[in-house]
Image (tube, grey):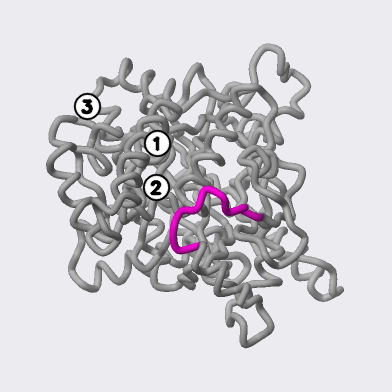
Amino acid sequence: MEREKRYLAYKSYNPSRVIRFGTTMHNCLAFNVLKSRQWQETQMDDWDIFYADTGWIHENLPYSGFASGGLRLNEWQKVNHFPNHVELTRKDLMVKNLKRMKKNLEKEGRLEDAKELDFFPQTYHMPSEASLFIRKFKELRQNGENQTWIMKPIGRAQGKGIFLVNKLSQIEAWLKERGSQKAENCCYEDYVCQRYISDPMLICGRKFDLRIYALCLSYVPLKVYLYRDGFARFSNTRFSMNKDDLSNNYIHLTNHSIQKQDASYNSKVTDLKWPIGSLRKHMSATYGPDVANKVFDDLQQLIINSLLSVQKVIINDRHCFELYGYDVMFSEDLKPWLIEVNASPSMSADTDSDRKLKMGLLDDMLSVIDIEQKWSCFGKTPPRVGGFDVIYDENGPTKPHSNSSIHSFLGCANDRERQLMQLQKEWESCNAKVMSGAVSQENLDHYVNVSKTTSKSLHSSAFR
């Protein structure tokens, strides 16, 4: 009986309903945001949303689901990871899925579509593809190419365990050491070996990468929102490809957890981060608005294609959503390169600007997910909610607005508070019509469609 009451309460907006949440992550900003919405934490299994680390997901939402001992979730419950998110967020599996999609497109004769997937560096899984890598290394060496490769453990983050190599003997030594560890039954892990981007785009002589946030609500159909804000992370030391500098992580790795260990780093001078909006303005001023728009369009398409590459292998549990942290770099020709996708992007903050960005990001994420069912009176989630813009839905990729030359709003003005106020007014108007009986729940879709074409509310470019 209680479950039935909860389900009926879930189906429509009820301002008196208490939202309950569970979490394993009390030491990050997400916990603060959940509390700031006046939601109640619970230690029981009666939560509406559970914000968990990936370990909890693997223990409680196994791939085979309830039959193998996993949780049986109620209709209204949401969790913040898909069960097999590793298909996108583990370095080797991400590349495997991208390679498979590209190969399938080539088989179908869709060569232009396949070419759009040329955004990840040449990659080998180590040690299983060591022989292929060695053959490729020797081939490039015979052609006189100088080559640098970067070795990354497949399951670690924050730059841990990463190193660069430019000699075959270095790889052979690594393989030998790993073989001895295996023989001695020591802990060891697989790596990916990627062609290092030796010609990165530099600003003031320093290397940088981007952290971008994408929110996936569903894989079937694919529905994705992209956040307008993000940031560039810079190295503290000027870039160099000198052989003597290959072991200098302060030059080659932009992870903030590494850069702040540099003895010359001074947090009072800079946090080595730059808002992505400032980067877009810099590129527009340096290369022209059309070039900058094209670069950010390519970034958006990269994110869409990466999600499409795992669409058929991700378990599309309707209880799940995921906020991905994309790490992307530019080469000097302004080509974007996908470095990795994070299932648990850092939600800690070192500065006020970092805290403001992430608090707004998390709050807007919860608004999009809509635990309260506010958007039920609209019939569907609006195309923009706070700083999030929909970039792909059941109709495919979103199309540019007729009155705008901008396709991607990544790095554009994030007037999230003003937009949320405007959205609230639209919601109050729509909800009042439903509550008064002027618009019935059965005729709700018709009301929304009329609103689209007449007053340009709900799903119009005014929100953008």
Q: Secondary structure at mark 1?
A: helix
Residues drawn in magenta: 10-20
In front: label 2 or label 3: 2
The amino acid type found where label 1 is placed reads Gln
Residue at which label 1 appears? 424
Q: Secondary structure at mark 2?
A: strand
For the residues labelled 1 and 3, say whether their Cβ atoms are less than 8 Å apart: no
In screen coordinates, is 128 left or right of 210? right
Q: Is residue 183 above or below residue 406?
A: below
Residue at which label 3 appears? 290
Residue at which label 2 appears? 225
Of 21 and 19, which appears nearest the observer?
A: 19
State the image quarter where residue 74 is shown: bottom right
In screen coordinates, is 356 left or right of 110? right
Identify the residue shown where x is 47% and y is 25%: 202
Q: Is residue 339 visible?
A: yes
In front: label 1 or label 3: 1
Q: Which mark is residue 129?
A: none
Q: Is residue 187 above or below residue 1?
A: above
State the image quarter where residue 35 is shown: top right
The amino acid type found where label 2 is placed reads Tyr
Q: Secondary structure at mark 3?
A: helix
